[in-house]
C-alpha cells in the first residue's frame, strides 16, 4: 500500500523545491547573516579542553577578499601572514616565529551572525574551537598594576652548587605533556641509568596550570589531576620534581600565571612537594617594564625562600637586561641567557657560541642557562648533538634533557650519559671556559679542571672537515702532555707542544690535557 502524499506533485512545486534547495546550499556556503566585511576588532575565547580558556584578540582589515592585520596570542603581538574571507569563511595564518616559518597558528571558520566560529590549529595540532565576538582593544587591558618591592639581595638558598641536571617537558612535548608522561619519564630516568650519572630533576614546563579555586589557589588542569600525588611519585623514584609559572597574569602558553599570587603559589608548590620553579617572563610584559625585572623576580625569590622548602629558582626572561648581573641577587640559581632553542643546528649554534663573554658570571649556585638540551629529538646529526653536549658542559650550563627518555636510541644515551663530559659540566670549581682561538668557522675553547687538567673543545662550525690545533702555549704549558679523547673514551698518549685533530663539519673533538710533569 502506498501512502498518500496528500496532494499530487506538480511540476511548479518541483521547481520551487529546487530553488529552495539552491538557496539553502548558498546559505550553507554564505550564511545569510554573515557580515560582508570582517574588518574590526574581535575577541576570541576558546576553551582549550583542560579547564582553561585561551583568549586571542584579532584586529582585522579586509580589502576585497584578502584579510590582513594583527593577532595577539598569549600576550604577544603577531602580524597575520595571510588571510582571506570568502563566502562567509575566514582563514587566517599567523606566523609565530620568523626563525621558524613552520611555527604558526591558523584560524579557520565561518561567520555566524555577528560572530565568528573558529577552529585554532597550532603547528599540526587542533588546539581549540571558539567563538569570536566584536569588541574593542579595551578587552586587552592588563589587570591593575601591583606595587613592586624595593630592591635587596635575596639570601642564597644554598642549592645548585653545580649546574642542575634533569629533564624538562617543553622541547619534546610542549602542550602535550600530562601526568602520565611525567610519571613515565621519571620511571625512564631512574631505569635508563640517567639518574646514576647525575640527572635528578623531572621538570614540568608550561600548560599544567588550571583555573584558581574559590580561595584563589592555583590548581592543576585536567591533564594534571593530582599535583601532590605526582610529586610523591617522582620522589619515590629518588628524583626531584620541577614546576613552571610566570610573573604575569598569563604564562607564555596563555595559561594562568602567578601575578598577584606569588606568595600563595610558592606555598602551594611547597605544599605539593616541588623542588624547582622555572619562572617565565612573557605575560609579565603586559604589566611591567623590562627595567623592573630585578624586582619582579626578587618577589618570587623571596616567596620561595619563605616557604622553607629548598626550591631551585630558574629565571627565564631570555637574558636582557644583563640578568647574569642581577639574577643571583634576585635569588636565581640559573637564568636563561638566550631566546628559545629549537632542534636545529642554527639555534643551538647561535645559543651556545654566544655564551663565552658571560661565562665568568657562572659560579656555584648561580648559572647561565643557554636553554635546554635538544639531544635525541631528531633534528640534528649525532655530531651536532655532540657539539651541543660538549659546549653546554664546557659552559657549565644546566643539563636538562628535552627528549623522550622512554624511547632513547643507544646513540642518544651515549651522548646524554657520557660521564666524562658530564664531569666537565659538574666541575666543582669556579673555573670558566675561554675561547682560546677563533678563525671562522673554527673555535677552540678551553676550561681548566681540577688536578692540573684542561678540557679543550675543538669546534668546527663549518661545512667541511677541518684540521684544528691547540697548542700548550695557549694553555700556559709546554713540553709533553697527556691527551684523552672524551667522545672516543680513549687515551691518545703524550703530545709535545700541541695537539692536532681532523674535526668533522658541525662537529667537535673534545679532549682533556693532563699535566705530565714534563715541561711546565
Ligand atoms: C617560553 C620559554 C620556553 C617554554 C615556553 C612555554 O618560550 O622560553 O622554554 O617554557 O615559554 O610556554
Image: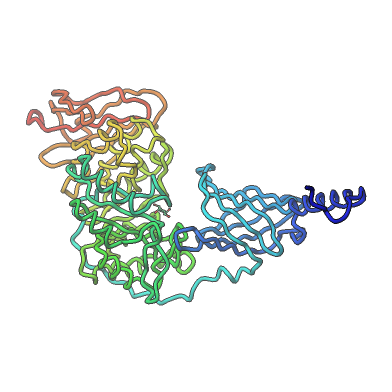
Q: Position of residue 364 (x, y in %)?
A: 20, 54
Decide if residue 41 is on the left or right side of residue 232: right
Q: How many marks?
A: 0
**Residue at 26% in and 58% down:** 231
Colour pattern: rainbow
Q: Position of residue 278 (x, y in %)?
A: 33, 58
- Quadrant in the picture for residue 150: bottom left
Q: Residue 216: in sight, yes or no?
A: yes
Q: Quadrant of the C terminus?
A: top left
Q: Nearer the viewer, residue 211 or 403?
A: 211
Q: Where, by quadrant of the figure, is residue 320 drawn?
A: bottom left
The answer to whether one can see residue 317 in this image is no
The image position of residue 504, as x and y in percent, is 34, 25
Q: Residue at x 40, y 29 (%)?
A: 462
Residue 42 in percent (x, y) is at: 64, 63
Above or below residue 216? Residue 65 is above
**Could you tell me which residue is drawn at 55 percent across and 49 percent down?**
121
Question: Considering depth in this image, is 95 or 454 the residue closer to the camera?
Answer: 95
Q: Decide: is 485 above or below 405.
A: above
Q: Is residue 436 above or below residue 248?
A: above
Amino acid at each position: 500500500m502506498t501512502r498518500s502524499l496528500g496532494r499530487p506533485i506538480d511540476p511548479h512545486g518541483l521547481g520551487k523545491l529546487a530553488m529552495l534547495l539552491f538557496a539553502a546550499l548558498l546559505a550553507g556556503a554564505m550564511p545569510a547573516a554573515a557580515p560582508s566585511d570582517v574588518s574590526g576588532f574581535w575577541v576570541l575565547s576558546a576553551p582549550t579542553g583542560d579547564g582553561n580558556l585561551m583568549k586571542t584578540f584579532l584586529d582585522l582589515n579586509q580589502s576585497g577578499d584578502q584579510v590582513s592585520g594583527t593577532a595577539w596570542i598569549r600576550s604577544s603581538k603577531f602580524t597575520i601572514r595571510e588571510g582571506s574571507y570568502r563566502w562567509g569563511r575566514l582563514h587566517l595564518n599567523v606566523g609565530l616565529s620568523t626563525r621558524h616559518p613552520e611555527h604558526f597558528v591558523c584560524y579557520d571558520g565561518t561567520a555566524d551572525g555577528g560572530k565568528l566560529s573558529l577552529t585554532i590549529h597550532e603547528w599540526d595540532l587542533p588546539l581549540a574551537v571558539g567563538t569570536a565576538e566584536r569588541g574593542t582593544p579595551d578587552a586587552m587591558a592588563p589587570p591593575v598594576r601591583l606595587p613592586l618591592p624595593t630592591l635587596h639581595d635575596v639570601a642564597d638558598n644554598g642549592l645548585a652548587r653545580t649546574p642542575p641536571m634533569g629533564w624538562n617537558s617543553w622541547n619534546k612535548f610542549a602542550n602535550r605533556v600530562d601526568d602520565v608522561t611525567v610519571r613515565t619519564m621519571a620511571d625512564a630516568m631512574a631505569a635508563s641509568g640517567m639518574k646514576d650519572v647525575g640527572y635528578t630533576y623531572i621538570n614540568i614546563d608550561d600548560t599544567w596550570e588550571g583555573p584558581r579555586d574559590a580561595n584563589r589557589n592555583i590548581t592543576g588542569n585536567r591533564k594534571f589531576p593530582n599535583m601532590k600525588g605526582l610529586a610523591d611519585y617522582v620522589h619515590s623514584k629518588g628524583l626531584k620534581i620541577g614546576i613552571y609559572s610566570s610573573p604575569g597574569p598569563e604564562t607564555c602558553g596563555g595559561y594562568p600565571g602567578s601575578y598577584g599570587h606569588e606568595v600563595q603559589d610558592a606555598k602551594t608548590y611547597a605544599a605539593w612537594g616541588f623542588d624547582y620553579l622555572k619562572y617565565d617572563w612573557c605575560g609579565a610584559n603586559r604589566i611591567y617594564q623590562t627595567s623592573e625585572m630585578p624586582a619582579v623576580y626578587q618577589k618570587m625569590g623571596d616567596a620561595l625562600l619563605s616557604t622553607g622548602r629548598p626550591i631551585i629558582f630558574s629565571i627565564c626572561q631570555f637574558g636582557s637586561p644583563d640578568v647574569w648581573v642581577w639574577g643571583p641577587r634576585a635569588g636565581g640559581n640559573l637564568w636563561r641567557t638566550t631566546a628559545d632553542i629549537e632542534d636545529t643546528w642554527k639555534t643551538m649554534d647561535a645559543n651556545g657560541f654566544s655564551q663565552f663573554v658571560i661565562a665568568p658570571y657562572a659560579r656555584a649556585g648561580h648559572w647561565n642557562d643557554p636553554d635546554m638540551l635538544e639531544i635525541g629529538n631528531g633534528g640534528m646529526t649525532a655530531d651536532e648533538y655532540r657539539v651541543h653536549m660538549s659546549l653546554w658542559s664546557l659552559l657549565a650550563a644546566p643539563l636538562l634533557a628535552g627528549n623522550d627518555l622512554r624511547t632513547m636510541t643507544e646513540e642518544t644515551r651515549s651522548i646524554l650519559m657520557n660521564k666524562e663530559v658530564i664531569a666537565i659540566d659538574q666541575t666543582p670549581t669556579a673555573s670558566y671556559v675561554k675561547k682560546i682561538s677563533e678563525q671562522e668557522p673554527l673555535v677552540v675553547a678551553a676550561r681548566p679542571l681540577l688536578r692540573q687538567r684542561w678540557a679543550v673543545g675543538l669546534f668546527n662550525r663549518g661545512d667541511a672537515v677541518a684540521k684544528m690545533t691547540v697548542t700548550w702555549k695557549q694553555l700556559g704549558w709546554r713540553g709533553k702532555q697527556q691527551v684523552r679523547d672524551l667522545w672516543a673514551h680513549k687515551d691518545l698518549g703524550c703530545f709535545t707542544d700541541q695537539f692536532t685533530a681532523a674535526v668533522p663539519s658541525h662537529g667537535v673533538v673534545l679532549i682533556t690535557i693532563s699535566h705530565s710533569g714534563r715541561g711546565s
